[in-house]
Amino acid sequence: MKGVVSAPLNLPGTAYRKALQSRATILKFIERKMEERKSEIKEEDEAEDEAEINDDLLGWVLKHSNLSTEQILDLILSLLFAGHETSSVAIALAIYFLQACPKAVQELREEHLEIAMAKKELGESELNWDDYKKMDFTQCVINETLRLGNVVRFLHRKALKDVRYKGYDIPSGWKVLPVISAVHLDNSRYDEPNLFNPWRWQQQNNGACGSSSSGSGSFSTWGNNFMPFGGGPRLCAGSELAKLEMAVFIHHLVLNFNWELAEDDQPFTFPFVDFPNGLPIRVSRIL
Ligand code: HEM
């Protein structure tokens, strides 16, 4: 990630060189996997048996697409890159915001306990889509984490023709960087925008963590006010997967653990969100 935003100097010790080396290592790994998969698919075809091991994206593109090896490598690498750091930082942000908001943790626990009990009665253990759809408050926590945490702060766009916008002329070909974090932290759009307040995503505002307000129904229409995954034709391809990953993580976290910061840390953006001390936490299992 550091190499992506560093000066393109391919010299020993630079972040750029490390990124190029990492890229080559990962590509080699994916290529090896591809070769393994190809021979598995061949064996499978010979045995006329639909094995489940190929039932993932790599298996799918190898079987059903006309993409070249280079395109498949690029696709898998891009998805790993786009989906890894973003989701893990979002989960770290949730851990961070929630440890300062016991009321939200309590409400999450109630929601997830209910889901877990219902599953136990049915003799099921693994979460499924129906369980996910019951996670209403969890969705509020996820939205609020993404709004306040701003995993991605701005988007990249280019003016395809001369544009006049609110009295400004943007010439064709100019780069335009919409700063979505500025929208998410705008106090004309969000009451007390610097507070972690998952309840703002409900119709009724029950009071934010750290807020003195007792809740006055600060719900507004979100639409263009909320775009952690960008928007338009380039909207994040993994937005639903990312929210699902967060929800599953939160489910297991709140049901099984208490946690607190082991040392002071806070999110810092330069230019990607990160925790300078690695967000060390002390975890204890709930008996
Ligand atoms: C919390 C986690 C995530 C956040 C905040 C996030 C955010 C974003 C943003 C802001 C964009 C740019 C959209 C635009 O230009 O309008 C983007 C693009 C993209 N994201 Fe994500 N993302 C996340 C997770 C993921 C995951 C898990 C995947 C896939 C496994 C993924 C795959 C992609 C891809 C492929 C694009 C490029 C889409 C395109 O240009 O057509 N993202 N993401």
Image (cartoon, rainbow, N blue to C red):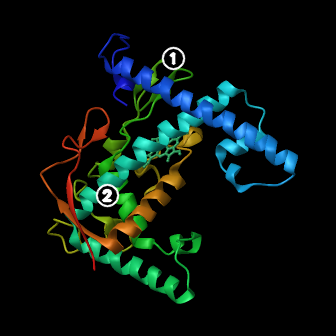
Location of residue 66 with respect to 171 vertically, above or below: below
User: Which amino acid type is shown beneath numbered disc 1?
Assistant: Gly
Mark 1, Cα crowd under 10 Å, few <14 / some 14-19 / many 20+, is few
The percent coordinates of residue 17 (x first, y second) are 38, 17
- Name which of mark 2 and mark 1 comes first in the sequence: 2
Depth check, mark 2 against mark 1: the one in front is 2
Tag 2, which secondary structure? helix
Mark 2, Cα crowd under 10 Å, few <14 / some 14-19 / many 20+, is many
Which residue occupies the foreground of this view, 181 or 170?
181
Which residue occupies the foreground of this view, 139 or 70?
70
Q: Answer left or right for 37 relative to 3.
A: right
Query: In the drawing, what numbered circle is on residue 94?
Result: 2
Location of residue 186 with respect to 8 vertically, above or below: below
The percent coordinates of residue 33 (x first, y second) are 62, 37
Which residue is located at x 68 percent, y 33 percent? 35
User: Which amino acid type is shown beneath numbered disc 2?
Assistant: Ala
Which residue is located at x 34 percent, y 67 percent? 253
- Residue that carries the numbered disc 1 in the rendered image: 173
The quadrant of the picture occupied by the N terminus is: top left
Q: Give how far apart the Cα atoms at labels 2 and 1 are.
A: 38 Å
The answer to whether residue 196 is seen in the rendering is: no
Badges 2 and 1: C-beta atoms under 8 Å apart?
no
Tag 1, which secondary structure? loop
Which residue occupies the foreground of this view, 212 or 70?
70
Q: Answer left or right for 212 relative to 137.
A: left
Residue 160 found in image quarter = top right
